[in-house]
Amino acid sequence: MKKILLLAVLMNFTFTIAQTPCSGGNAGGYPCNGLTLQSFISLASMGATSGNDSWGWTDPQTGKEYALMGVNNGTVFIDITNPTSPQNLGKLKSHNNVNSLWRDIKTYNNHAFIVSEASGHGMQVFDLTRLRGLTANSGRTFTEDAHYGAFGKSHNIVINEESGYAYIVGSGLYGGGPHFINIQNPTNPINAGGYSGDSYTHDAQVIVYHGPDPDYQGREILIGSNESKVVIVDITDKANPIKISSLSYSNYNYTHQGWFTEDERYFILGDEEDEVHEGFNTRTLIFDFNDLDAPTLKFTYYGPTAAIDHNGYVRKNRFYLANYEAGVRIIKISDIANGVMTEINSFDTYPEANSANFHGVWNIYPYFNSGNLLVSDYTRGFFLLKDPNYDNTDPNAVCQNINATLTNSGSVTINANMLDGGSTDNKAIVKKTISKNTFTCKDLGPNLVDFTVEDDYGNKSTCTATVTVVAPTTTYSGNSWNNGTPGPGSNAKISSNYDTSIKGSVDACTCEIDANKTLTVAAYDYLNVTKDITVNGNLIVQHQGSVVQFEDDATVANNGLINVEYTTPFMLPKTFLATGSPMTLETREGAFASSYQVKNHLTENFVPNPEVALQFPGAENFADDNRDDWVNYSGAINPGEGYLAFPQLNGTDGNKTYDITFEQGTLNSGHIDFNVIYNGDSNSSPNVLANPYPSAISAIDFINANSMINEVYFWNPNTPPSPLLPGAYTMNFNMEDISMYNLMGGTPAPSDPTQTDPSGYISTGQGFGIKATAAGVATFTNAMRVTGNNNVAPRPLADGNDRIWIQVKNEQFQMQNNTLIGFSNLTTSGIDQGYDSRRLANVLSLYTHLENGSEEFGIQSREIFEDGAKVLMGFSSLLDENLEYNISIKDIQGPGFDNATVFLIDNELNISTNLSQESYTFKAEKGTYNSRFTLQFRSNEVLGDTATALEKVSVYPNPTTSILNVVSPEAKISTLEIFDVSGRRLKNMDLSTATHYEVDMNNLQSAIYFVKISTDKGSVTKQIIKQ
């Protein structure tokens, strides 16, 4: 109770009252609901004038129960083993015999620890075992067994019995914050420091946390009620307490005291003065502490009266509230997660009123195993109550096992009654729950499910049942399915030959292929199975067909024949594929027996070619210094590893496609790991991997799952190796054949005549490169697999991001290059892992910089698109002559560009081009031109609607060195505004009375400007150049 307590003390009875059941809403003259008055002891008979806090102790040796009640002049000890005839055993007076209205008591290890607001009181320690064998003697005076005097007065004491620490709050130490005391040896308390980070703490709860937030499980956590807010502090390390979070709430007046629900999910708080000052009925605030770093107010409960709330405690599914003039209120909280609290019992010790004044119940202690409810009343004294329906006996849960058959759609739902094998309780079972009620194909087979029964008092019992999930079989025989078309909940059994090109793709939970029968998965079709596939016959996966399994523990049993067929692209002589295998035991001598060369990559031998690195210091390259990173290979084709395969018969063979069949072992499925090698920096660490599955995988999912990978690179068989290409080999690979893809999108290989962007999918057995940012293990999982996009290159799906591809091209040598700029709410103007990728070392290159001119990106992701966005761009060329180049928009995507105009500014020549309308042509010699261009995006509203421009309005001369003349033969000009390319207005001229329109440009620097001319017939914007 706060110090403004009103001292209106009514009469004190000088006698005890024996047991009186609640009948007709009354027990011994006190209004009640369902609570029996077992006994009462007046303040006068305890030699006191006011009561305060209380706590309980159960003797572990005898089982006797004792009430410890604070009064104005000490602590009274009452034996309540016979609840209808309590025995007052005596009193421990205040230290120094100084009286106080405030006292607080807690117990630990058979000792009581007592603090008070009395001056110089400190902490008293009393050995409770001294109560054994004593009989009633209200005049008996006890002495303290130990005293801790590091502080004088304090308001409350909190004890965490699990850690053996007491916490003093509201003392003169640590600004009134918690003072830590080691009481593991109760009669030798040791100062352990404190926490002053949030000033005065009125009350607190301290626990070793076992709640839902995994970040703090096993930590000692203090939840402080700090007058205007709730504070959460990690006090595991007493020398270094760390604040986790705090929160307040509307209409706070005095944040008083709170308590966790037993699952430590919700914190129930009372504000002591809100009823006084705000006029609320008793208000209880319930906070959701699912995330201790970000607690939230879940809901507010209002009681039936205007009385002030004081202390409240939780036991099982009930909240026990000391409610001053409204007495004791017991509120059921079994449905608190859904915002429901229901009052079920009450006992009013102050019948005179239910107003917001300080009379009546100060505290309730609900933790006796007997169900005795210890109530300390500020005005009248000691009450002992009990619910006659109190139950402390657990039910008996009895389980039965069941089968659960999946529906065709792939799920089945059960309820708790299905698992009840005859559970019982001494009173009644009111609730049955199960740990899982919905099952899918991934749960196929036996599943252990907890079945819990609960009685009205929250006593629970749990047993474990086995729920066996079954997928019903549908068999394809003859020309049809005997149990309906299979779905995600079916076992699809192939008992006749089945071709998906005729009968359609198959979705199933599991699949079986009978002996001597063949399932053919045709191009663009799929077999999509959540769990296991059993092949007793033949499974033929044709080129661009897909077999997908979802669960990572899914297997493929090959008891017959499995073929995965692959047809290469059109292969010129000496061109190659980056490839791997979808089978577990494939070898170079198997699928690649007719290939004249197969090579694997030794990342540990790779050193960037110094000649290439010198020419392209800001770019990525795959050229080695001494040609020892690729070696001829024979043996196993390891799942997940990429190889270079030359499928031709020899070095002169080619100009056609080649068929490759993978057939050794069984289909790869589940987790497949690849050891990534890191040579100290990304450019020195190319690793070559391959999709290990008989289906495509999502490149985005793969990048997101592996932190050492920012992008993937694809080798396109467009150009044969040549001695004219840079590198250490006699015949060097062409960097123009590499396309790139990251989380924002992709850019095509410069040598690709179709200029097709990577689709974002990696097809069956397709090899790809990465540039590792760290060593580690790259993991493939079934979750990355998809049923389509196998060797198909569609446009990336619209995802709300804005993307623009800018292309530079030289027609004479048919050279080209693209850069991608994306805008997203997931990215920033800095470097974002997985979204920003350096350019490749290409003959011709267009790339972007950060705002400060650093870095050279082939793909750059920026913050969310806004009007006026600028991107600095560079350009490089290895072509010797002074040649003509053309820059244009290759592609554009996203809603941000719907009302935007794209300008390219040549920073060297001071030329601005509206790329939305036309391309830009310029000449350049061999070289690197960092920051040569700026790409700028402007809103059409800012620049003016060119579609409605007045055609006869003109400006001259343009370019101009000084004076700009404006001609408007048919529309009267009212105003003229000049903007720079950033949209900043530089001039605003009123020309409404002018007869001759001219603008003095002398004070403007040489640059590109926009002149907006407003007339009585509309407005028009003209681009001008000031020289």
Image (tube, rainbow, N blue to C red):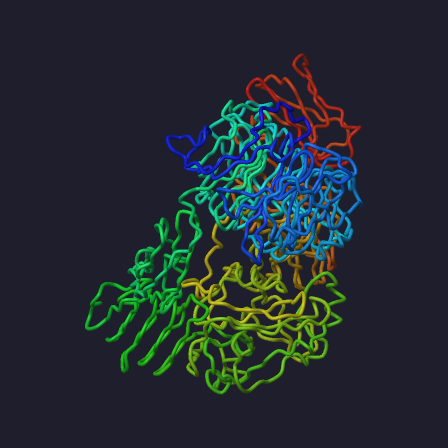
Quadrant of the rendered structure where residue 510 is?
Answer: bottom left
Kindly identify the residue that appears in the image at 40 percent across and 30 percent down. 25
Q: Is residue 340 shown left or right of residue 995?
A: left
Relative to 176, is 925 above or below?
A: below
Q: Is residue 804 shown left or right of residue 831?
A: left
Front residue of this view, candidates 741 and 986? 741
Quadrant of the rendered structure where residue 966 is?
Answer: top right
Quadrant of the rendered structure where residue 402 is?
Answer: bottom left
Front residue of this view, candidates 945 and 900? 900
Q: Position of residue 9 (x, y in %)?
A: 61, 24
Q: Is residue 946 visible?
A: no
| Total residue callouts | 0
Q: Quadrant of the N terminus?
A: top right
Kindly identify the residue that appears in the image at 49 percent across and 54 percent down. 796
Front residue of this view, candidates 56 and 867? 56
Q: Is residue 468 shown left or right of residue 801?
A: left
Q: Is residue 1027 shown left or right of residue 337?
A: right
Q: Position of residue 596 (x, y in %)?
A: 53, 85
Kindly identify the residue that appears in the image at 59 percent across and 64 percent down. 706
Q: Quadrant of the C terminus?
A: top right
Q: Position of residue 258 (x, y in %)?
A: 59, 40
Q: Position of residue 932 (x, y in %)?
A: 72, 49
Q: Is residue 530 visible?
A: yes
